[in-house]
Amino acid sequence: MRHRNHSKRLSQKPHHARLIQRNLVTSLLLYERVRTTKKRASVVRPLVEHVLTIGKTARPDLAIRRINEVVTDRNACRKILEVFKDRYKTRSGGYTRMVPVGMRGGDGAKLVDLMLVDGVGIDTGKPAQKKEKTKNPKRRVKTPSVSAA
Protein backbone atom coordinates (compact mmCIF):
# COMPACT_ATOMS: atom_id res chain seq x y z
CA MET A 1 0.00 0.00 0.00
CA ARG A 2 1.12 3.56 -0.65
CA HIS A 3 -0.02 5.15 2.61
CA ARG A 4 1.75 8.47 3.27
CA ASN A 5 3.78 8.22 0.07
CA HIS A 6 2.92 11.40 -1.78
CA SER A 7 5.56 11.38 -4.50
CA LYS A 8 4.61 10.47 -8.04
CA ARG A 9 6.06 7.32 -9.56
CA LEU A 10 6.90 6.11 -13.01
CA SER A 11 5.87 2.57 -13.87
CA GLN A 12 9.45 1.33 -14.02
CA LYS A 13 11.86 -0.39 -11.73
CA PRO A 14 13.39 2.17 -9.36
CA HIS A 15 16.83 2.23 -10.95
CA HIS A 16 15.43 2.69 -14.45
CA ALA A 17 12.98 5.36 -13.29
CA ARG A 18 15.84 7.29 -11.65
CA LEU A 19 17.85 7.16 -14.90
CA ILE A 20 14.86 8.41 -16.91
CA GLN A 21 14.44 11.31 -14.50
CA ARG A 22 18.13 12.26 -14.55
CA ASN A 23 18.29 12.13 -18.35
CA LEU A 24 15.14 14.24 -18.74
CA VAL A 25 16.43 16.84 -16.28
CA THR A 26 19.76 17.02 -18.12
CA SER A 27 18.09 17.34 -21.52
CA LEU A 28 15.76 20.06 -20.28
CA LEU A 29 18.64 22.07 -18.83
CA LEU A 30 20.75 21.74 -21.99
CA TYR A 31 18.06 22.36 -24.62
CA GLU A 32 15.55 24.36 -22.49
CA ARG A 33 12.64 22.41 -23.98
CA VAL A 34 11.70 18.71 -23.98
CA ARG A 35 8.68 16.93 -25.42
CA THR A 36 7.61 14.03 -23.23
CA THR A 37 4.53 12.44 -21.69
CA LYS A 38 2.52 14.34 -19.13
CA LYS A 39 3.28 11.85 -16.36
CA ARG A 40 7.04 11.98 -16.89
CA ALA A 41 6.95 15.77 -17.05
CA SER A 42 5.04 15.98 -13.77
CA VAL A 43 7.62 13.71 -12.12
CA VAL A 44 10.62 15.63 -13.50
CA ARG A 45 9.31 19.14 -12.86
CA PRO A 46 10.04 19.26 -9.09
CA LEU A 47 13.55 17.92 -9.70
CA VAL A 48 14.31 20.71 -12.17
CA GLU A 49 12.94 23.33 -9.79
CA HIS A 50 15.07 21.97 -6.95
CA VAL A 51 18.27 21.80 -9.01
CA LEU A 52 17.84 25.36 -10.27
CA THR A 53 17.19 26.61 -6.74
CA ILE A 54 20.34 24.87 -5.49
CA GLY A 55 22.39 26.43 -8.29
CA LYS A 56 20.98 29.84 -7.50
CA THR A 57 21.30 29.89 -3.70
CA ALA A 58 24.11 27.55 -2.59
CA ARG A 59 27.83 28.28 -2.58
CA PRO A 60 29.33 27.32 -5.97
CA ASP A 61 31.55 24.52 -4.62
CA LEU A 62 28.66 22.87 -2.75
CA ALA A 63 26.24 23.55 -5.59
CA ILE A 64 28.40 21.69 -8.10
CA ARG A 65 28.43 18.56 -5.95
CA ARG A 66 24.69 18.66 -5.24
CA ILE A 67 23.77 19.36 -8.89
CA ASN A 68 25.99 16.54 -10.17
CA GLU A 69 24.01 14.07 -8.05
CA VAL A 70 21.06 14.69 -10.40
CA VAL A 71 22.52 15.99 -13.66
CA THR A 72 24.47 13.61 -15.91
CA ASP A 73 26.36 16.15 -18.05
CA ARG A 74 29.08 18.58 -16.99
CA ASN A 75 27.85 21.22 -19.47
CA ALA A 76 24.39 21.24 -17.88
CA CYS A 77 25.91 21.93 -14.46
CA ARG A 78 28.02 24.72 -15.92
CA LYS A 79 24.97 26.20 -17.64
CA ILE A 80 23.05 26.29 -14.35
CA LEU A 81 25.84 28.19 -12.60
CA GLU A 82 26.60 30.60 -15.45
CA VAL A 83 23.36 31.19 -17.35
CA PHE A 84 20.38 30.23 -15.22
CA LYS A 85 21.73 31.74 -12.00
CA ASP A 86 21.62 35.21 -13.57
CA ARG A 87 18.40 34.61 -15.51
CA TYR A 88 16.38 33.53 -12.48
CA LYS A 89 17.96 35.70 -9.76
CA THR A 90 14.73 37.64 -9.18
CA ARG A 91 12.36 34.66 -9.61
CA SER A 92 11.57 32.64 -6.50
CA GLY A 93 10.38 29.43 -8.15
CA GLY A 94 8.20 28.42 -11.06
CA TYR A 95 11.03 27.97 -13.55
CA THR A 96 9.19 25.48 -15.77
CA ARG A 97 6.03 25.44 -17.86
CA MET A 98 4.06 22.48 -19.25
CA VAL A 99 2.26 23.15 -22.52
CA PRO A 100 -0.04 20.37 -23.81
CA VAL A 101 0.78 19.28 -27.35
CA GLY A 102 -1.64 16.46 -28.11
CA MET A 103 -1.68 12.69 -28.16
CA ARG A 104 1.10 10.32 -29.18
CA GLY A 105 0.25 8.35 -32.28
CA GLY A 106 1.27 4.88 -31.11
CA ASP A 107 -0.37 4.53 -27.73
CA GLY A 108 -2.42 7.69 -27.26
CA ALA A 109 -0.36 9.03 -24.35
CA LYS A 110 -0.79 12.73 -23.57
CA LEU A 111 2.25 14.70 -24.73
CA VAL A 112 3.45 18.00 -23.28
CA ASP A 113 6.29 20.39 -23.96
CA LEU A 114 8.19 20.93 -20.73
CA MET A 115 10.12 24.19 -21.07
CA LEU A 116 11.99 26.71 -19.01
CA VAL A 117 10.32 30.11 -18.72
CA ASP A 118 11.95 33.43 -19.60
CA GLY A 119 14.22 31.78 -22.13
CA VAL A 120 15.77 33.84 -24.87
CA GLY A 121 14.22 32.99 -28.22
CA ILE A 122 11.87 30.43 -26.71
CA ASP A 123 8.17 30.32 -27.43
CA THR A 124 6.18 31.65 -24.48
CA GLY A 125 3.28 29.31 -25.08
CA LYS A 126 1.02 32.09 -26.31
CA PRO A 127 -0.49 31.80 -29.78
CA ALA A 128 1.07 33.99 -32.42
CA GLN A 129 -0.79 37.16 -33.29
CA LYS A 130 -2.34 37.23 -36.74
CA LYS A 131 -1.27 39.95 -39.12
CA GLU A 132 -4.04 41.99 -40.63
CA LYS A 133 -4.30 41.85 -44.37
CA THR A 134 -4.04 45.23 -46.02
CA LYS A 135 -5.73 45.92 -49.28
CA ASN A 136 -3.43 46.93 -52.05
CA PRO A 137 -4.77 50.29 -53.37
CA LYS A 138 -2.77 50.03 -56.60
CA ARG A 139 -4.50 46.90 -57.80
CA ARG A 140 -5.87 47.36 -61.27
CA VAL A 141 -9.45 46.46 -61.96
CA LYS A 142 -10.05 44.77 -65.27
CA THR A 143 -12.57 46.55 -67.44
CA PRO A 144 -14.36 44.79 -70.25
CA SER A 145 -12.75 45.58 -73.57
CA VAL A 146 -14.90 47.07 -76.27
CA SER A 147 -14.12 45.83 -79.72
CA ALA A 148 -14.77 47.97 -82.77
CA ALA A 149 -16.88 45.93 -85.07
Image (spheres, rainbow, N blue to C red):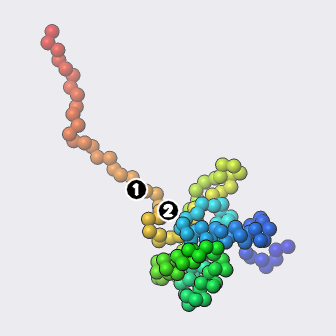
Residue 66 shows which numbered tag? none
- Amino acid type for the residue under numbered disc 1: Gln
**Left or right of 6 in this view: 95:** left
Residue in the image at 17% along x and 14% along y = 147
Badge 1: residue crowd in 10 Å (few <14, some 14–19, many ≥20): few
View extreme (top): residue: 149
Residue 23: give x, y in percent of width and height. Answer: 65, 68
Q: Could you tell me the amino acid type at mark 2? A: Gly
Question: Which residue position holds label 2?
Answer: 125
Rendering quarter of residue 142: top left
Identity of the residue drawn at 56% across and 90% down: 59
Q: Can residue 94 be seen in this view?
A: no
Q: Quadrant of the N terminus?
A: bottom right
**Residue 127 percent across, percent down from the top left:** 46, 57
Q: Is residue 108 above or below residue 118?
A: above
Residue at the front extreme, as displayed: 74
Of residues 72 and 101, the one nearer the viewer is 72
> What x and y, as percent, mark residue 145?
19, 20
Residue nearest the observer in this picture, 126 or 70: 70
Residue at x-position 63% and y-position 61% = 36
Q: What element carries label 2?
A: loop
| Residue assigned mark 1 | 129
Q: Report if residue 75 is visible in the image.
A: yes
Helix, strand or loop at disc 1? loop
| Left or right: residue 15 compared with residue 87 | right
Location of residue 79 with respect to 103 vertically, above or below: below
x, y percentage for residue 130? 39, 52
Q: How far apart are marks 1 and 2 (CA)?
A: 12 Å
Task: Say which quadrant the C terminus sits in.
Answer: top left
Q: Quadrant of residue 112?
A: bottom right
